[in-house]
């Protein structure tokens, strides 16, 4: 979508998500605003053009946390930010993932991917955590309690989920911000979504009834998935004062 509209773009990966394990005694987490800040600072040094920044799912929450932590300094780095299907209330999403169909299907799928990466980290840094406790984790809560929380400076899962969640800081945003969540996202309960009264004037909430978790298929079966990216990129461009090439003829 960016390329179609004459925009340069970069798709960064969190540590350990690019196919190569990182070397430090850390991985990534839902509130990893330091990592986001490092990436954006590097991009800002390479260009004077406006930076429009988009985060998806876990990355969306981390991006919002960066904008919140950066405060007024964020506008010197980015012109606007958007998150898509971000779990802005990690406790609510964590509880949803630990129940019913989510636990039987999605949680098992996630843990099958996350546990081997964690064990690679243990091989790099013996004694980093208790292997048996991690291998015995059956929920994201248990996994985060053994691995994610202690490795990244949190006391436990509750501390991690509370401090890393973006929702409670949305009233303090200083950058133009778009927060997109659907009402039928299996990972993000509708009851946990922010209301207009809970966000600042710089924040635009878009909460369509359908779309699932980063799905947003549109039109007759099998549908197409261009509507959401076009809408989000158009919003970001408008906030940044950028004319999209794709809009010149439309």
Image (tube, rainbow, N blue to C red):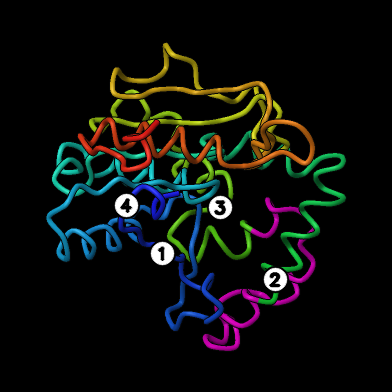
Residue 23, x across and y down, in percent: 44, 83
Image coordinates of residue 144 in percent, x first then y, are 62, 57
Mark linked to residue 12: 1
Residue nearest the viewer, comparing 139 with 71: 71
**Coordinates of residue 32 in the picture (x, y in percent):** 41, 55
Foreground mark, 4 or 2, reads: 4
Please state which of the two labelled residues, at mark 1 or mark 4, is closer to the viewer: 4
Instruction: Tell me the chief SS of the magenta region.
Output: helix
Q: Would you identify the image quadrant in which residue 44 lies?
A: bottom left
Classed neighbour count for the residue bearing mark 4: other residues with Cα under 10 Å, few (<14), some (14–19), many (≥20): few
Q: Secondary structure at mark 3?
A: loop
Between marks 4 and 2, how big is the CA–CA gap? 40 Å
Please tell me whether residue 121 belongs to the stretch shown in magenta: yes
Residue drawn at x 42%, y 11% is: 197
Residue named by callout 4: 6
* Whether label 1 touches label 3, CB < 8 Å: no
The image position of residue 33, as x and y in percent, is: 35, 52
Q: Residue furthest front?
A: 249
In the image, is residue 118 part of the stretch drawn in magenta? yes
Q: Where are the magenta residues, as a range?
A: 117-143
Task: Decide if residue 100 is on the left or right side of residue 160.
Answer: right
110 relative to 238, above or below: below
Which badge, 3 or 2, comes first in the chain's sequence? 2
Q: Residue at x 56, y 78 (%)?
A: 19
What residue would you read off at disc 3?
156
């Amino acid at each position: 979508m960016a390329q179609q509209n004459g925009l340069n773009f970069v798709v960064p990966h969190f540590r350990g998500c690019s196919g190569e394990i990182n070397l430090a005694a850390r991985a990534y987490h839902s509130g990893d605003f330091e990592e986001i800040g490092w990436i954006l600072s590097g991009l800002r040094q390479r260009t004077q053009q406006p930076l429009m920044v988009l985060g998806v799912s876990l990355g969306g929450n981390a991006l919002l946390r960066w904008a919140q932590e950066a405060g007024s300094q964020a506008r010197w780095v980015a012109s606007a930010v958007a998150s898509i299907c971000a779990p802005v209330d990690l406790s609510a999403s964590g509880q949803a993932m630990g129940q019913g169909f989510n636990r039987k299907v999605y949680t098992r799928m996630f843990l099958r991917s996350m546990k081997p990466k964690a064990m690679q980290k243990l091989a790099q840094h013996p004694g980093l955590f208790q292997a048996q406790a991690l291998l015995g984790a059956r929920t994201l809560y248990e996994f985060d309690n053994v691995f994610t929380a202690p490795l990244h400076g949190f006391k436990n899962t509750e501390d991690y989920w509370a401090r890393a969640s973006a929702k409670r800081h949305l009233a303090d945003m200083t950058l133009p911000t778009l927060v997109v969540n659907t009402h039928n996202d299996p990972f993000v309960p509708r009851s946990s979504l922010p209301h207009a009264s809970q966000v600042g004037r710089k924040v635009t909430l878009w909460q369509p009834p359908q779309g699932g978790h980063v799905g947003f298929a549109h039109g007759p079966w099998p549908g197409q998935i261009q509507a959401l990216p076009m809408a989000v990129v158009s919003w970001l461009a408008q906030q940044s004062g950028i004319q999209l090439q794709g809009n010149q003829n439309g």
